[in-house]
Amino acid sequence: LKKHIKTHTREKPYACDSCDYRTSLLGRMKRHIRTHTGEKPYACGSCDYSASQLGHLKDHIRTHTGEKPFACNVCDYKAARKSSVDLHMKTHLGTHWLSTGVKPFECEICQFRTTSSQHLKTHIRTHTGEKPFTCNECDYRTGDPSGLWAHRKVHTGEKPYSCDTCNYKAAHSHNLKVHMRIHTGEKPFTCDVCGYRAGRLNNLKLHKMTHSGEKPFKCSDCDYQAARKSSLVQHLKTHKASVSVAGETLDNTCP
């Protein structure tokens, strides 16, 4: 009851010594402090995964057991995590408008239209820069709740999307979609200069540099420039000192 009363009084007596975070619950503060210390006391008995929160470990263990205890009450969708079902439920919010093809919710800043008021709210944050959804494991912030849900898999190790052709597994559906093009041969990205086709957008961007002559990766020791970071990394082996590339320090000193 005392814990509940604090939700009304907004009292937050527990303050973090490392940042401005405050909370009304001691247990929540202990979990937060682990984001600074890096402590992960909860270990998986089946692999090397460890977590800072017991709930994250429970979520992870389901990647081994295949258990999906959370179910959608509209369709047959099931998930290992409640947050996954909560996110999935938003796909039903615009069901009426999806059936008619009408997109009544329109952005006042650009031409974006959608069938769901929730989708519009998420979109508007791309203009305002608002990022209210925060990871409690690290400093990641986003304006899209689905983005936070996807990001959390970095911490849980969950990879629910499996390739039917090989053993590849992915944390995000988009990564699986891109991977499947290896098997299907699909190359949806086309160069408007020469007709070159690619399965990945990034590969097309790299290809276009052969036309533009753009070489964004520069050696800090000499005048060498490259269109690809991998080419610059290879070049750095000709030098013996550690140099900085795009904000990263690359040590190419031979052992």
Image (spheres, grey):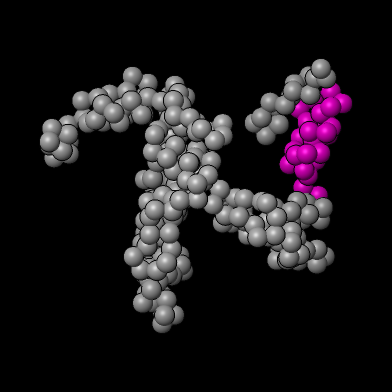
Quarter of the image for residue 57 reads top left
**In which quarter of the view is residue 216 placed?**
top right
Residue 6 visible in the current orientation: no
The stretch drawn in magenta includes residue 219: yes
Residue 194 x %, y %: 82, 65
- Please name whichever residue, 71 or 66, is drawn nearer the observer in this view of the structure: 66
Residue 168 visible in this rendered orientation of the protein = yes
Residue 44 appears left or right of 191? left
Which residue is depicted at the point 43% across and 53% down?
A: 68
| Residue 192 x %, y % | 76, 66
Residue under the point 74% across and 53% down: 203
> Can you say which quadrant of the picture contains the C terminus?
top right
Query: Can you name the residue that lies furthest to the right here?
Result: 238
- Residue 48 against residue 154 in the figure, above or below: above
Q: Magenta stretch: give its range.
A: 213-239
- Residue situated furthest bottom in the rendering: 100
